[in-house]
Image (tube, rainbow, N blue to C red):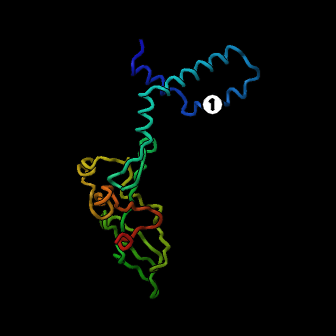
Amino acid sequence: MHTVNSLSTKATGLPISIQIDVVKFLHQLPSANPKVLQVVAALLNATETLVALPEFQEMKEEDEAEQHCVRCHDTFTNNENGPSSCTIPHLFDTMPSHITAHGGYVKISGYGSRCCGPDVEVEEEGVGANRFTNLDELDQCYEGYHTMDVGEVEAEEEYNEINIRRCKMDSDSGECVQECIVDKDPVFDKSLQ
């Protein structure tokens, strides 16, 4: 007797690349062994039957449907949502919190994080040179799964209205038009105004 748990456990043992593996296997067969071809045909027939089930198709549609993340405001699908899919960079002050000078020249400028406080800082060699010296050491302000659950973000007290902001709804379409902050270089507060 099969149960959902026993079948789920068995399915987890299948390689994710099963389609590629089957095609490769068939092309590498030294000869057309009828017993092997019968096993492969049974697998493919069972797979076709499974993917034709309305329940399976409904699940795939849900997994591939575009959704809106209420934390980072990016678009995502369940298929692409992983433990580091939702990333939000720190937002830094435009004015340095400290400057280190040597021989009359600015050596290092430090810019504090508006979202996480003075403990998180980006350092720049000189002023306005865009040569940031500690980018490899900085983590994201937030990194995790995308979510559509406002309650989850509120419960974790993540909304700071600095870089993790609530949805801004368009009155005509009813859709969120809040900007998604993309992390390419350090993000300074002037870039979001």
Q: Residue furthest top?
A: 1
82 in relation to 181, above or below: above
Q: Quadrant of the N terminus?
A: top left
In the rendered structure, the answer to whether residue 64 lies left or right of residue 28 reads: left
98 in relation to 160, above or below: below
Q: Position of residue 186 (x, y in %)?
A: 43, 67
User: Which residue is at 41% across, 76% downward?
Assistant: 109
User: Which residue is at 41% across, 47% downward?
Assistant: 66
Q: Quadrant of residue 88?
A: bottom left
Label 1 CA crowd tier, 10 Å (few <14, some 14–19, many 20+): few
Of the residues shown, which amino acid type is indicated by label 1? Answer: Asp
32 in relation to 117, above or below: above
* Mark 1, secondary structure of its residue: helix
88 in relation to 106, above or below: above
User: Which residue is at 49% across, 78% downward?
Assistant: 129
Query: Exactly how many numbered labels are in the figure?
Result: 1
Q: Position of residue 6 (x, y in %)?
A: 42, 19
Q: Residue furthest bottom?
A: 104
Q: Nearer the viewer, residue 145 or 43?
A: 43
Q: Quadrant of residue 191?
A: bottom left
Q: Position of residue 17 (x, y in %)?
A: 57, 33
Residue matched to label 1: 21
